[in-house]
Amino acid sequence: MQKLEMLYEGKAKKVFKTVEEKLYIVDYKDDATAFNGVKKGTIVGKGVVNNKMSAAMFLMLEEKGIPTHFVKLLSDRESLVKAVKILPLEVIIRNVVAGSFSKRMGIEEGTELKETILEFCYKNDELGDPIINDYHIYAVGLADREQVATVKEYAFKINEIMKAYFLERGIRLVDFKLEFGLYEGKVILADEISPDTCRLWDVATGKKLDKDRFRRDLGDVEATYQEVLNRIQG
Ligand code: UDP
């Protein structure tokens, strides 16, 4: 399948139309940003890792009953996906205290949570993706009640599936961000699942195996992204 006009260029990916109205091509870049675009850089090979890892995660989740936008891998950096309309929500799942939650709540990073947390952010770069709740979603009309119920059900299921999947690979799933889209009127999982969108800690050593290596200048960034992919590909 050929790329036609570019529809959208984000921080980490480009999206292209294809001859099929219902299919897009996603092209993963090596560009990395953090802190709402304030920190910019390149992680060499990241696009390849995130493309291949997302493909593996979406295939695995589909097998376990989660509908996703993924159709097939086209190349090292490109995937064919269903053309969804993205819901303007970032869905964050937290198993362990980290990142913005640690700052906001004043709780030390690494603290195990008594229950899994689901947070919504309004997907809007200019506003810095502010945290919102269900009332904001309905009052503003970002999604309807049925869509939100489905998003929550899928997000918690995905968490259980991914926690077990990563644990088998010696990785603790700390937190992650999901995006969902509408396809033929139904909610399906979209965007990506990668070290850019998940916090992953090595079970044995506690080493951070994710974008925090870039955010916090911890070094060993490229090799760590590759290491995560290697563990997934076995
Ligand atoms: N996350 C993401 N994109 C965002 C914000 C967060 O992929 O725009 C991911 C992030 O990598 C982490 C989780 O969501 O795995 C929770 O992020 P947090 O709210 O702690 O924000 P951060 O500390 O990344 O600013």
Image (tube, rainbow, N blue to C red):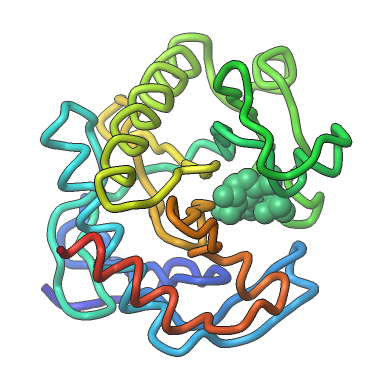
The x and y percentages for residue 137 are: 66, 21
| 205 or 151, nearer to the observer | 205
Q: Residue at x 79, y 56 (%)?
A: 126
Q: Residue at x 15, y 63 (%)?
A: 234
Image quadrant holding the N terminus, namely bottom left
Query: In the displayed structure, would residue 63 be above or below residue 127?
Result: above
Residue 173 falls left or right of residue 129: left
The x and y percentages for residue 177 are: 52, 44
| 79 or 52, nearer to the observer | 52
Q: Quadrant of residue 69?
A: top left
Q: Residue furthest front?
A: 204
The x and y percentages for residue 33 are: 65, 73
Q: Is residue 18 visible?
A: yes
Q: Residue at x 61, y 83 (%)?
A: 219
* Numbered disc total: 0
Q: Quadrant of residue 188?
A: top left
Query: In the displayed structure, would residue 191 be above or below residue 224?
Result: above
| 169 or 122, nearer to the observer | 169
Q: Quadrant of residue 25?
A: bottom left
Query: In the displayed structure, would residue 170 be above or below residue 113?
Result: below
Q: Is residue 124 visible?
A: no
| 13 or 193, nearer to the observer | 193
Q: Residue at x 46, y 12 (%)?
A: 149
The x and y percentages for residue 166 are: 32, 46
Residue 87 falls left or right of residue 2: right
